[in-house]
Image (cartoon, helix red, strand yellow):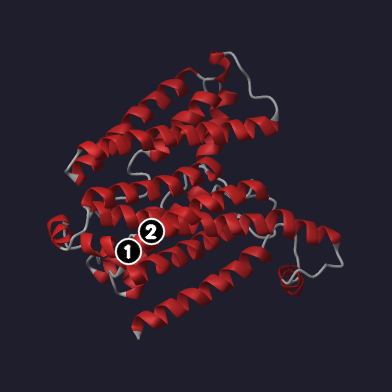
Amino acid sequence: MQTSKSILLLSLCFVALLLLSLSLGSVYIPFTEVLKALSFQSLDNETWQYIIQNYRLPKTVTSILVGGALSLCGLLMQTLFRNPLAGPYVLGLSSGASLGVALVVLGSSSLGFGLSAEISERWIIVLASSLGSFLVMLSILATAKRLKDTMALLIIGLMFSSITSAIVNVLSFFSSSDELQKYIFWSLGSLGNLSWSEIGLLSICCGLGILLSIILIKPLNALLMGEHYATSLGINIKQTRLLVITATCLMAGAITAFAGPIAFIGLAVPHLTRQLVKTTNHIILVPSVVLFGASLLLLCDSIAELPFSELSLPINAVTSIIGAPVVIWLLVKQKYIRF
């Protein structure tokens, strides 16, 4: 009964935050007009129609996809490694994407090509980020086939992160101030610059990752009791590990490519959701984590937009400033981590 009430509360919060995200912005639009736009009715004010259809709605959909998928990645990693500090980027995906973007943005002048056209620059950065994440993913998958110890895989992922971060630091040291500024803006994360075609591609990657996670619910529940217990139940550990890593790489890699590295959500939302629904059963946790993550990122994005102002805060800063104190308060209140 408690779990049902919690899921109902989550669903109501999600709907309220979705409407709030569409209503708030630098331009005031009456709430009734937002509802009309959502029901595919034409608005009398063409400017309002343009703002909702081409700016606020794509940003809201992106927030839902990024928040839900990153939170699910965090749940998968924490269950696989049985480590409460594991997150979607623990395998070095974010670092691989950062290295790809750093090579293009910080090393473009040294490599003999410039990034002058805005459209081509946007897609080059997406491709570089995707390629960086993909190469790290291939390395992790190749390593996972040879290793029997899951914790060793976690350490290798952290080593990948250290190597790529060191290369990015060297590139930053030799780059110009303009190149460094471009790279810093990308690393701050952004939810508002995606076109509908880019959102479509992101939706496919996140959808496939969520589908794989649903298929893996039974093995994930078994892994909570340890790999030996899961093996005794007939679970193929190596195959499960590869599928979990593939789902995580697919979602986290696509999100980093299109929205930049988004901090905090993937690590903290699984813990917050467990505290709320009071269960470790993945049949309930998987949809709850997606719903909670989408709601939290909608809230953070609404705050980042600074309603009725033309200024916007970096989404990475808001997720950490708003979210970290909440996690600290919950853990202090509960006095232990539900895992």
Mark 2 element type: helix
Q: Measured from the top left, where is residue 64 in percent x and y?
A: 54, 60
The residue carrying mark 2 is 213
User: Based on the displayed image, in which of its 4 quarters is residue 84 positioned?
Assistant: bottom left
User: Based on the displayed image, in which of its 4 quarters is residue 35 positioned?
Assistant: bottom right
Please tell me which residue is depicted at 62% across the width and 46% down the height of the picture: 198
Q: Relative to 16, is 278 on the left or the right?
A: left
> Does residue 20 sit above or below 235 in this rendering?
below
Q: Measured from the top left, where is residue 118 in percent x and y?
A: 69, 32
Please tell me which residue is depicted at 58% across the width and 13% down the height of the picture: 112
For the question of whether residue 321 can be seen, the reply is no
Q: Measured from the top left, where is residue 72 in percent x and y?
A: 40, 58
Q: Relative to 264, is 241 on the left or the right?
A: left
Type of residue at label 2? Ser
Type of residue at label 1? Ile
Q: Do tag 2 and tag 1 residues touch (Cβ < 8 Å)?
A: yes
Please tell me which residue is depicted at 36% across the width and 73% down the height of the picture: 276
Structural crowding at the residue carrying mark 1, measured as other residues with C-alpha within 10 Å and reported as few (<14), some (14–19) or many (≥20): some
- Quarter of the picture containing the N terminus is bottom left
Please tell me which residue is depicted at 25% across the width and 42% down the height of the picture: 154
> Does residue 211 sit above or below 246 in this rendering?
below
- Quarter of the picture containing the C terminus is bottom left
Q: Residue lying farthest bottom?
A: 1
Structural crowding at the residue carrying mark 2, measured as other residues with C-alpha within 10 Å and reported as few (<14), some (14–19) or many (≥20): many
The residue carrying mark 1 is 217
Mark 1 element type: helix
Q: Relative to 180, is 193 on the left or the right?
A: right
Q: Relative to 138, is 318 on the left or the right?
A: right
